[in-house]
Image: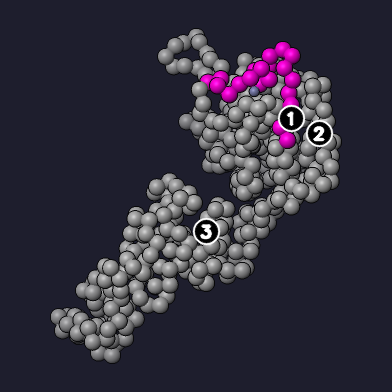
């Protein structure tokens, strides 16, 4: 490829406050249309906005977690444009003095670490939603429940050089927002959404190329596909001697391509000016310090600590820390049973399988950390095999029974470690397969596994595999 890819991202996060940014209306999703409204969020004349302190708290959390400087006197601005979902005729946002500036986020792509600059984070209100019913043409409705719901917009530097880097940045950013409990990170429902600015330039060129802005990508995969498509499209234009035009393009999932939405000529002139209805947001040192103290351990730090403290492979640490609750569950289990790797294996292979099938969070798991620890202890002390443990786990899960020891006792699942009984079983199997024993002794050493398997089968998985191995070896050499 003759060109260097330059990508910058603008991410909107819907904040998890209970009430809207400038009024006391509920932010609850799924209420009746226009149920969560009042004169302020429907833009009635004379209604005045009052800033929700929690929004400032949340924006500061996002800023401090991404190493931004907090602006101690930031201001709100009016971004003017007309659209029916925007009842005031302007959106209250921040322009010249946003609440957070100059942060960064470290990402990892193919084992390489890279620092992506964050230009700014600002607070703003969301718009309402137009509804175009299918049953009636020529009619549209407007629902203002979402109007005035708080957002932060996180603007990156144009530091990313591939779609893989863009996706890594977005994932890292989403993980942080979810850890901070300020955004649910749901891309499909649009509570975490991103626009991408993309341009190409010849290697070594001092200036950036002309960029296109991509919108409407509602999953990581779509972000990747849209960027890859756009890179292809722009390089074709440049290869043919043409010029890329500055425009906004929409990603069309069905057609797998980006399509022009509006060009530079149609771009809005927002006529920003400071909102006269709102005072500057003044934040003192003590407030910043309070927020800083309240930050949780962030995903990257947790991942590194898990790998180091519990001697886990990077991949395990990644899975376990992807969700803060899952990480807590793991650590709670380690307190009862100090074999972290065994616990990690069980959570990743069994627990997650069940949780994903039922589409529930680890918080709703019927198997408690103590129950899981107890089950793993039964494997470790030789009471049951790993195979039987899976059966026991299934019962613990389906019956919310956290006493695996009792399940094993009640159902006689304990491993057969009685050598007399095992010897009889081993000898029976060997006698019944004397032809195969001859093959084995003639050099077909792979046959060994067959004998072990037969004994295990006969014991319904309850024979102690180590003892079975030894007993067979003693007899057939
Ligand atoms: Zn309201």
Mark 1 is surrounded, within 10 Å at the Cα level, by few (under 14), some (14 to 19) or many (20 or more) other residues, namely some
Q: Nearer the viewer, residue 365 or 460?
A: 365
Residue 72 in percent (x, y) is at 84, 39
Whether label 2 lies within 8 Å of ligand 1 gets the answer no
Is label 3 in contact with label 1 (beta carbons under 8 Å)?
Answer: no
Residue 453 within the magenta-colored segment of the rendering: no
Task: Tell me where the magenta segment starts and ends, as one range.
Answer: 33-53
The residue drawn where x is 31% and y is 86% is 470
Q: Earlier in the sequence, mark 3 or mark 1?
A: 1
The prevailing secondary structure element of the residues shown in magenta is loop
The residue drawn where x is 35% and y is 76% is 383
* Total numbered badges shown on the rendered structure: 3
Is label 2 in contact with label 3 (beta carbons under 8 Å)?
Answer: no
In the rendered view, tell whether residue 209 sits above or below residue 308: above
Residue 53 in percent (x, y) is at 73, 35
Is label 1 in contact with label 2 (beta carbons under 8 Å)?
Answer: yes
In the rendered view, tell whether residue 362 sits above or below residue 158: below
Position of the N terminus by quadrant: top right
Q: Earlier in the sequence, mark 1 or mark 2?
A: 1
Residue 240 in percent (x, y) is at 64, 32
Query: CA–CA distance between discs 1 and 2?
Result: 9 Å
Position of the C terminus by quadrant: bottom left
Q: Which residue is mark 1?
A: 51
Query: CA–CA distance between discs 2 and 3?
Result: 39 Å
* Residue 322 visible: no
Mark 2 is surrounded, within 10 Å at the Cα level, by few (under 14), some (14 to 19) or many (20 or more) other residues, namely some
Residue 354 in percent (x, y) is at 40, 53
Tag 3, which secondary structure? Answer: helix
Q: Which residue is mark 2?
A: 281
Ligand 1 - quadrant of the structure image: top right
State which quadrant residue 127 falls in. top right
- The numbered mark at residue 329 is 3
């Amino acid at each position: 490829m003759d060109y260097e890819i330059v990508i910058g991202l603008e991410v909107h996060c819907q904040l998890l406050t209970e009430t809207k940014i400038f009024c006391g209306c509920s932010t609850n999703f799924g209420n009746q249309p226009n149920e969560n409204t009042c004169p302020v969020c429907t833009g009635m004349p004379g209604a005045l906005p009052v800033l929700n302190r929690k929004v400032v708290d949340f924006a500061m959390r996002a800023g401090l977690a991404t190493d931004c400087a907090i602006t101690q006197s930031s201001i709100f601005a009016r971004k003017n444009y007309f659209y029916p979902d925007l009842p005031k005729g302007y959106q209250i946002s921040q322009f010249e003095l946003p609440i957070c500036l100059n942060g960064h986020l470290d990402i990892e792509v193919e084992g390489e670490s890279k620092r992506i600059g964050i230009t700014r984070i600002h607070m703003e209100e969301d718009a309402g939603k137009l509804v175009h019913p299918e049953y009636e043409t020529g009619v549209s409705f407007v629902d203002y429940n979402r109007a005035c719901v708080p957002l932060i917009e996180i603007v990156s530097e144009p530091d990313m050089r591939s779609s893989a880097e863009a996706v890594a940045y977005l994932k890292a950013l989403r993980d942080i927002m979810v850890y901070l409990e300020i955004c649910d990170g749901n891309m499909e429902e649009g509570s975490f959404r991103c626009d991408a600015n993309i341009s190409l330039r010849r290697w070594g060129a001092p200036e950036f190329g002309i960029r296109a802005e991509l919108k409407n990508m509602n999953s990581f995969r779509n972000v990747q596909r849209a960027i890859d498509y756009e890179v292809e499209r722009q390089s074709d234009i440049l290869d043919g001697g043409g010029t890329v035009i500055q425009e906004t393009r929409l990603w069309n999932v069905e057609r797998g391509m980006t399509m022009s939405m509006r060009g530079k000529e149609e771009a809005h002139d927002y006529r920003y000016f400071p909102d006269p209805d709102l005072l500057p947001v003044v934040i003192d040192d003590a407030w910043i310090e309070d927020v800083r103290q309240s930050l949780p351990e962030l995903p990257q730090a947790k991942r590194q600590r898990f790998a180091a403290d519990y001697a886990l492979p990077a991949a395990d640490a990644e899975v376990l820390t992807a969700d803060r609750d899952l990480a807590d569950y793991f650590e709670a289990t380690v307190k009862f049973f100090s074999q972290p790797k065994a616990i990690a294996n069980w959570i990743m292979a069994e627990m997650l399988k069940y949780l994903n099938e039922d589409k529930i969070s680890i918080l709703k798991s019927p198997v408690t950390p103590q129950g899981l620890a107890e089950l793993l202890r039964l494997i470790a002390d030789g009471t049951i095999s790993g195979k039987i443990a899976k059966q026991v786990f299934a019962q613990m899960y389906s019956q919310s029974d956290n006493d695996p020891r009792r399940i094993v006792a009640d159902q006689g699942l304990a491993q057969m470690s009685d050598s007399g009984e095992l010897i009889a079983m081993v000898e029976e199997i060997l006698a019944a397969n004397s032809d195969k024993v001859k093959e084995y002794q003639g050099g077909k050493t792979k046959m060994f596994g067959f004998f072990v398997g037969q004994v295990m089968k006969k014991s319904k998985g309850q024979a102690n595999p180590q003892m079975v191995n030894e007993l067979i070896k003693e007899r057939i050499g």
